[in-house]
Image: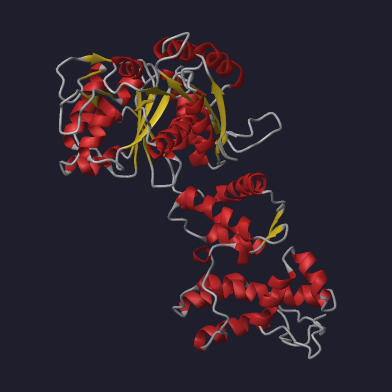
Amino acid sequence: MPKLLVIDDEPNITFTIAETLGSDELQVLTAGTAREGIELLRRQRPDVVLCDVRLPDLSGLDAFDRMHEIDPRIPVIIMTAFAKTETAIEAMRRGAFEYLVKPMDFQALKQAVQRALEVSRLSHVPAVLGELESDEDDPNAERIIGLSPAMQEVYKTVGRVASQDATVLILGESGTGKELVARAIYHYSQRSQKPFLAVNCAALSESLLESELFGHEKGAFTGADQRRIGKFEQVHGGTIFLDEIGDMSAATQAKALRLLQQQQFERIGGNSTIQTDVRIIAATNQDLATMVADGRFRQDLFYRLNGFTIRLPALRERREDIPVLLNHFVNVCNRELGKNVHTVTPEARAILEAHDWPGNVREFQSAIKFAMVHATTDVLTPDCLPENCRPKTNGDSASGSEGRLMTNASESASASVPNNLGSEPSDSKLDIAELTRRLLAAGQTDLYRQLIAVVDRTILEETMRHLDGNQLQTAERLGISRMTLRNKLRSLGLLAEKPDGDDS
């Protein structure tokens, strides 16, 4: 469970914050002095610290410095009752995460703590290369999964570039894992004990993004009543991840170029040059080369970013990794949801492997979590999967040439015995390749659903015949639920309903 440490000498403040923010998902620790808080941080290693500026034994700035020495990756939010104090701003210049003015808006406090918790997770939870898990692995680690040749190349590139302190550009469609790769580079780098911050360039307007990255001086624009320290200044010595850098405006691109070239920048409205030491990892799902040709992205910035490039393949380009991803996410969901799913039916696996996954690994993970939530047994079946992943099924029997092709294929697979599964099979064998060719030649669409129906009929007829029509044993042997079996038998016309409800 994440931990928030609150350091304030006013008991009513610590009590109110603990009551407001404490929950089953966040543990709140409190301390009345700086030294008590520093000792708690040393022993408990909280995820976020909320520290007052004026404390009875040490100033908030001195307390921040000591906490920063213990672990510079822990975000520290400074609280002050004096809106114009330079102490809080100086703490931010040294690397504090944010400062808030008392009396605090608790909604703003909650949002700041949530942002800080996410930053802490990015810095502390490792992104691990590879798909194998062992008892010695960190259970909280987020893994980059894949055994395919394309992913092996990604691992090699991460290994080569991580320790070189160079700028890296990560390219790939949405959901392919660009942030995970950025964090893997960070965790394997020489800056792994320094802060890591992620900024989504597409989520902020031009003015807000520039202020977020470079900061601003008091009076730089309407509403700028205090100096603001930007991320490039805050994360000095660490790593910053610029996600969706293709959405950065031309003005911000120019400033980013100077920072990449000289590690220097100026705050908005300021004329003092600030020196920093930041490693930049950038990512985008856009074609930057095309944007350069169209004049929408600076060519010199593109060349600066493009020194080390990692291209992440779409999931449809590495389908051989789907079984490994499936096993991994089932295990993860078992832990998170308290489930005990240990079997995925072949039919469900086939559906997952056939889907194109336009949302890539992110969509795949969401689909597995959806299926796990809807699983009522220890078996994951097709009816657990999201509707958009499943092939079209409406229960209607095939008609026209499609129906004739499927009927012929079924007849070639086994004797057609819709309501009598006890007869002997024919010597003919199902030729799925021949059926596929015939459907293609006939100009049919939705081939996957048609072929699955033919395979289903063959499997169900043969298994039911072998087990003398016993549905319970058939469901167990096939690894599917009895309800799923009955639905399939009914849709294929293989279920003989009994008036008395006996479905054996």
Which residue in the rendered view is the most extreme toward the right? 468
Left or right placement of residue 156 versus residue 262 in this view = right
Q: Position of residue 322 (x, y in %)?
A: 57, 50
Q: Quadrant of the C terminus?
A: bottom right
Residue 65 vs residue 306, the one in the foreground:
65
Tell me: residue 335, above or below residue 349. above
Q: Work out whether residue 214 can be spotted.
A: yes
Tell me: residue 207, above or below residue 273. below
In percent of the image, x 46 and y 41: which residue is there?
Answer: 177
Which residue in the rendered view is the most extreme toward the bottom? 499
Residue 209, located in which quarter of the rendered image?
Answer: top left
Residue 115 vs residue 265, the one in the foreground:
115
In percent of the image, x 19 and y 23: which residue is there?
Answer: 218
Residue 467, located in which quarter of the rendered image?
Answer: bottom right
Q: How is the image coloured?
A: secondary structure
Residue 155 vs residue 428, the one in the foreground:
155
Q: Position of residue 350 (x, y in %)?
A: 60, 61
Q: How many marks?
A: 0
Q: Position of residue 413 (x, y in %)?
A: 69, 78
Residue 46 vs residue 173, the one in the foreground:
46
Left or right placement of residue 159 versus residue 200 in this view = right
Q: Position of residue 289 (x, y in %)?
A: 24, 40
Q: Quadrant of the N terminus?
A: top right
Left or right placement of residue 66 versus residue 491 in this view = left
Tell me: residue 271, above or below residue 119. above
Residue 464, located in which quarter of the rendered image?
Answer: bottom right
Q: Work out whether residue 317 can be spotted.
A: no
Tell me: residue 424, above or below residue 175. below
